[in-house]
Image (tube, grey):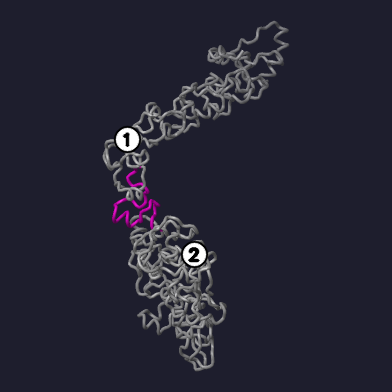
Amino acid sequence: MRPSMLFVLAALASPALANTADTGAGVPPTALGIDTDNDGLDDALEPWYGTDLLDFDSDGDGAPDGLEVVGPDLTPCTGDESNPMDADTDDDGVSDGAEIYGFDGVPFTGDEIDPNNTDTDGDGLLDGVEVGVSAPLPGGVTGSQGLPFVGTELSLFVPDGDAGTTRTLAYNADTDFDGLLDGQEDANGDGVVGGDQPGTANDETDPNINDSDGDGFRDRTEGGSGGPDSNGNGTIDALDPTYQPADSDGDGLTDEEEGVLGTNSLDVDTDGDGLDDGAEVWFWGTDPLDVDTDGDGLDDNFEAGFTDPANADTDGDGLDDGTEFNVLQTNPLAEDTDGDGLLDGEEVNVYGTDPRDRDSDDDWLEDGPEVAYGTDPNLQDTDGGGAYDGTEFLAGTDPFSPADDHDDTDGDGLDNAEESVFGSDPTLLDTDDCGIADGDEVDQGTDPTLQDTDGDGVSDFFEIEYGTDPTLSDTDGDGLGDGVEVAQGLDPLDPDTDDDGLLDGDEYARGTDPKVRDTDGDGLIDGDEVALGLDPLRADTDGDGLSDGDEVNEHYTDPLSVDTDGDGFSDYDEVDAGSDPLDPSNTPETLDEEQGCGCESGSGTAAWPALLMLSALIRRRSRNLG
């Protein structure tokens, strides 16, 4: 994004403008506060600079006039200003706008070059040559008032020799990271890769390829452009793939280089840090003789691919990477780990706040704003009046005076000091918008910041209206939350909605219907079935053809046994035949004989279990469904 014109205008208000190189003579006129063309330059100043007050970019170079007169840092008189009536201030063939905004069109991303310096990176190649400019920028006249502006000075311009076919980075002195400046590789500075020329004096390596001959050794290692021709074949070593210098350990450094560096030419990793010596020198920029090059407490190998092993403070926050990673557990790649507006180093070394906590003192105000406002980021209540600093700022009271800490700004029955404690909003009568004023919520024990204090799915307001406990998720203690009971049509105030002897929660667990006393319709209520060990979801638990209710209430047979008296005939068959299912001597087969001889049946002892069962069930029968 382009710099805000508001900042540009603010910078232009500085008296220091009178000393800038591109201003008119004397003291600039008083600004009118009018910027007709919205270029960041006040209408009163445009004539003084010679710009067109109706043209946003008088010289057509891509940068608004206001930005050119203060420079990318938005501060006048710092040397980065460009001429708003010269499309190419440094005459390198690159427009000032392209230099200021960089090649991605976004300033401050690292690809910008200096509109006042023909060789921004100091590599010996002009910026225009590096970016492939083959023609100068023309001058012209402004679009509205027809004022003349200038372009590239022809006598100073150097065109790119191959019209942009070969381009290097104008903001990086060594584009291919081979240890040679781009200007050293393009020795004649024409922007063309010369390659292998007659003889060796004019041979040039490729500034975009760190190993021009592809033999595994970087150009600098082999001597670079115009370097030695060790085998005398007329091609410099850096362009001759048939020549390879000795590298006994294969670490990417020649034995000669290792001798200079003091590394072991027979050990690929002299310092034993897990990085090859060549990688340390050529890629990471670390010391192959030091396990921890930057002395930050983290080994080079650990930092490689994570933090910068050659920079003790990768994120520039004022804390060493090792301290961040090992001690503070902050992020060594983020200058402000907790995002509170303070650098991690500032928090630790200056303010004593917690770099992992946006609000170190838990006063509802982040550390960064506290520092900006002047309150103490380590003290919840700077003025000691009872209201937290954040509450006071929200309420509009004075955090430096205790006199107003007990005001009730929103009239909800809680003063601001109390709102601080409960975390409610001092400007809202009902912070959680549940229908109950914050003060009333506190009085009844609910949380004024939560619509549903107990998290049962029923709002505090409804619970109070209904009569359930808004601080207890299961008011009747039946194992089902109040919200579930309300949703299912159960009574959250009655643990056994259908009065069948089972808690509503137990019924849900068993699969019975908590709104129906006899889920399976067998004549026994669910609670009695569970007490007797029967299945409340199966009308005939033992599968003998008689419902559980008939067995218990009518026939007094065992609903858990197909043949209560063990005579070989099921209870159903005996009932159907008219024999006694409680007397093993009375069966369908003997029924006719007993009736013929006039003998009385049931004189045996088999009936006593039925009597015991009857006595145990008689109380429940009174609760039977019919």
- Separation (CA) of disc 1 from disc 2: 58 Å
Q: Nearer the viewer, residue 185 or 308?
A: 185
Q: Where is residue 601 in the image (x, y as percent from the top left)?
A: 65, 9
Q: Where is residue 27 in the image (x, y as percent from the top left)?
A: 35, 65
From the viewer's perspective, is residue 193 above or below residue 565? below
In the rendered image, the residue lying farthest to the top is 598
Label 1: element kind:
helix
Which kind of residue does numbered mark 2 sit on?
Asp
* Quadrant of residue 390 within the rendered picture: top left
Which secondary structure class fits the magenta region best?
Answer: loop
From the viewer's perspective, is residue 427 above or below residue 175? above
**What are the residue bounds of the magenta stretch?**
334-363
Q: Nearer the viewer, residue 27 or 477?
A: 27
Residue at left offset 68%, top offset 15%: 575
Circle 2 residue: 52
Label located before the other in sequence (1 or 2): 2
Q: Which of 573 and 201 is in front in this view?
A: 201
Which kind of residue does numbered mark 1 sit on?
Ala
Circle 1 residue: 417
Can residue 300 be seen in the rendering of this structure?
yes
Residue at left offset 34%, top offset 39%: 392
Q: Is residue 342 magenta?
A: yes
Crowdedness of circle 2 by 10 Å Cα count: few (<14), some, many (20+)? many
Can residue 211 be seen in the rendering of this structure?
no
Q: Where is residue 572 in the image (x, y as percent from the top left)?
A: 68, 19
Q: Is residue 85 magenta?
A: no
Label 2: element kind:
loop
Q: For the residues carrying marks 1 and 2, which lies nearer the camera in this image?
A: 2
